[in-house]
Amino acid sequence: METVKKNIILLGDGATGKTSLVRRFVSDQFSDKYMTTLGSKVTKKDVYINTPTGQKHMVLLIWDILGQKGYQYTQALSFGGIEGALLVSDITRGSTLDSLKDYWIPSLVSVSGALPMVFLGNKTDLQEQAEFGEKELAALAKEYDPCNLSKQIFLTCSKDGRNVEMAFRVLAEAIMRNTEQAKLTYTQYIMDKTEINTIRDVTDHIIADFTDQFGGLANAGPVIEAQIMRVGLDINNPTKRELVELVNALAGIEERFKPEKVVSMNRSKRLYLVNLF
């Protein structure tokens, strides 16, 4: 089963219940004690997502950061590499909904760009004190719909767990759909031979395709370098024989963590590119 790691973040004003939502999701516990989150806290949670290419094991790295305005530079340090966000408001304080629109979302997207978002109206156990509800939450969410989620708003309660698990899962599924679509788009791109003019272009595309599916250059770089050295590929003057060996070597690596069908598809499309020359 393929395992992927994804970084998500909870954003919103202080005391909206972000830390309690994480605790409820990760350990199914709730604490009434509120402590201001200083800096960033990262929590891990394993989830399993069904996709068209099979079930995926997703390791969610959940970032819970300083919830006070005015620390935008400190907060921005946590935004790099984020692939989805839970935007948390407190239904008993209308100002927390305004803050999502005026501060938290602009701060995030200025660094991370468009990404899957799920909007939460938290503290439904205090419904009698509510200053806004699902209608207002939906109106805000409608302005930020980069991934066309079928449902991206939830009224939640970390105290009794209402909709907490569902909100995190919907975000995880949206991120996976986003990832799968990006891979499909990239595959279509590299299969367009008008973009392939030289055998070095082929080498470039094969390396980029493997890197994209291996979690980025930081993870894939050492692996690719080792395989290039093993097969004796000259990166400045690659040959067809060397590229075939590299494709097979990379497939051997992918067999350790990808479904057989995906490994076969990757090998076939890469060999197709090699055989253009």
Image: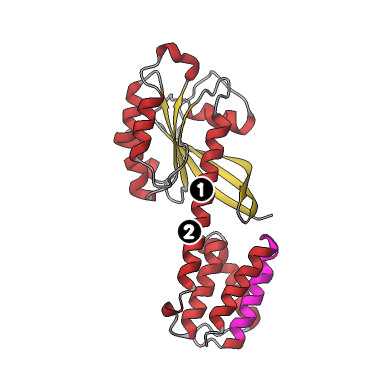
**Is residue 210 placed above or below 48 in the rendered structure?**
below
**243 falls in the magenta region:** yes
**Number of numbered callouts drawn:** 2
Whichever of labels 2 and 1 marks the residue nearer the N terminus, that label is: 1
Residue furthest to the left in view is 102
Q: What residue did someone put label 2 on? A: 182
Circle 1 residues within 10 Å: few <14, some 14–19, many ≥20: many
Callouts 2 and 1 close, C-beta under 8 Å: no
Q: What residue did someone put label 1 on? A: 175
Q: In this rendering, would 261 be left or right of 66? A: right
Range drawn in magenta: 242-260
Residue 264 position in % (x across, y down): 66, 69
Q: In this rendering, would 182 be left or right of 229? A: left
Q: In this rendering, would 85 be left or right of 269? A: left
Task: Answer whether residue 125 is visible to the viewer in this image.
Answer: yes
According to the image, what is the colour scheme of the structure? secondary structure
Q: Secondary structure at mark 2?
A: helix
Which amino acid type is shown beneath numbered disc 1? Ile
**Is residue 210 placed above or below 98 in the rendered structure?**
below
CA distance separating discs 2 and 1: 10 Å
Task: Answer whether residue 68 is visible to the viewer in this image.
Answer: no
Q: Which mark is residue 220?
A: none
